[in-house]
Amino acid sequence: MAAGAAALPAAQVLAGQPTAPPAVGAAANTAPALALVSRHLQWTSADHGLDVAQRAGFPAIIWTVRRGAHVEPAAVRTELPRIIKATQAAGLATPMVITGIGDAQSEGIEATLATLQNLGIRLYRAAAPRYDYAAPFQPQYDGFRAKLEQLARLNEKYGTTAAFHTHAYADTIGGSAWDLWMLMRDIDPRFVGINYDIGHVMAKGGAGWRESIRALGPYLHSVSIKDFRWEKLAQVPAGQWPWRTRLVPPGEGMVNFGDFFRYLQASGFAGPLETYYEYLAQVPGVAAPFDMLGTDVGKWQLTIPEAAFVALLQRDVQFYRQAWTMALTTPAPPPFSVKAPD
């Protein structure tokens, strides 16, 4: 399998060239960029993080612009250009950035969008709002729709695109992607869209990802890849639902990467693919499981050997490259059924 992946040209496996969201109706002509999310490098400096990403085999890196990250919103005008220049010098692409922007009133939004415009980076990840389960939904939808329209106008001004993340938290708008898409489907997809997290969408709605991703059409701008499985807790308070989502290394969970990657390939999806490590990793010689997600810059200390950390990154890079290649080179399975055979 590894030899097969290595034998294919890079553009046929996972390319590293930055891509803007294609124009409405335009066909994508490049493979998606497999990109390391800089959240996983917040135990070190941005400059050293570039070396780590290179050693792990990533062609791209997605930098985070929010509090606690390498780029604080207040310093975006100076720090992001410096980091992007260093990223380019290292031969890595930056197809998008991750932000805490949720609407047109978010902290430092115009400074961030103006900086992205100057750097030629169109796409940024945005944060979806939360439901208030104690209040009627329709007024909440109306309010967020108005905010989407306002944000779209601001993005049009700066030539940028907000891709809202699909978190599976119980109260997040967009966990199944449907509600986000229905709210933005009449807004120009050049300015708003969706960052589709296959792990979260499957945790929220199981096999329903097959319909939701097809509904998105031109609103699908970027994809987050991770794996999970359901676990039944042995002890919970009486009357409490015992099932929980456990994020795990790719290939050990429930995400159907084969069919998912086949859809992306058939639809001409141009990326990027955000690679996430949100699981606990067992490292030989280290007693406690290591949290790959970590925490903020200045607070997170690497408690395992750096070589072991890079090896964990490489393991997932290899998995996704092999899964992408297998999806390219093997026929689709029989029609899907949610019912197990008797």
Image: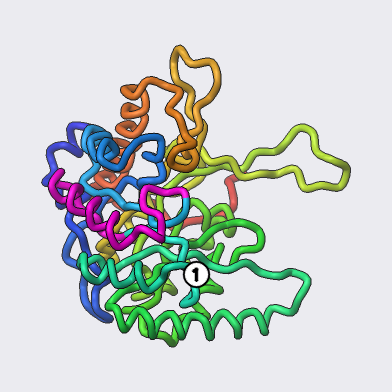
Q: Position of residue 72 (x, y in %)?
A: 40, 55
Closer to the camera, 42 or 146?
42
- Taking the spot 59% from the left edge, 52% from the top edge, the residue there is 339
In the image, residue 91 above or below residue 165: above
Question: Toward the viewer: 342 or 126?
Answer: 126
Please indicate, yes or no, whether residue 332 appears anywhere in the rendered image: no
Q: Which residue is drawn at the image coordinates 25% and 40% (left, top)?
A: 47
Q: Which residues are magenta?
A: 68-96
In this rendering, position of residue 210 left or right of residue 175: left
Tell me the quadrant of the picture where the C terminus can be found: top right
Q: Regarding mark 1 in the picture, which secondary structure is present there? A: loop
- 250 vs 172, left or right, is left
- Residue 88, percent from left and from top: 15, 51
Residue lying furthest top: 285
Which residue was labeled with disc 1? 102
Kindly indicate the quadrant of the structure image that contains residue 338: bottom right
At a point 75% along the width and 43% down the height, the residue shown is: 242
Which colour style is shown? rainbow
Q: What x and y, as percent, mark residue 193?
A: 40, 73
Kindly indicate the quadrant of the structure image that contains residue 283: top left
Q: Is residue 149 magenta?
A: no
The amino acid type, in three-letter code, at marker 1 is Gly
On screen, 319 above or below 19? above
Is 32 situated above or below 221? Answer: above
Q: Residues within 10 Å of mark 1 (few under 14, many from 20)?
A: many
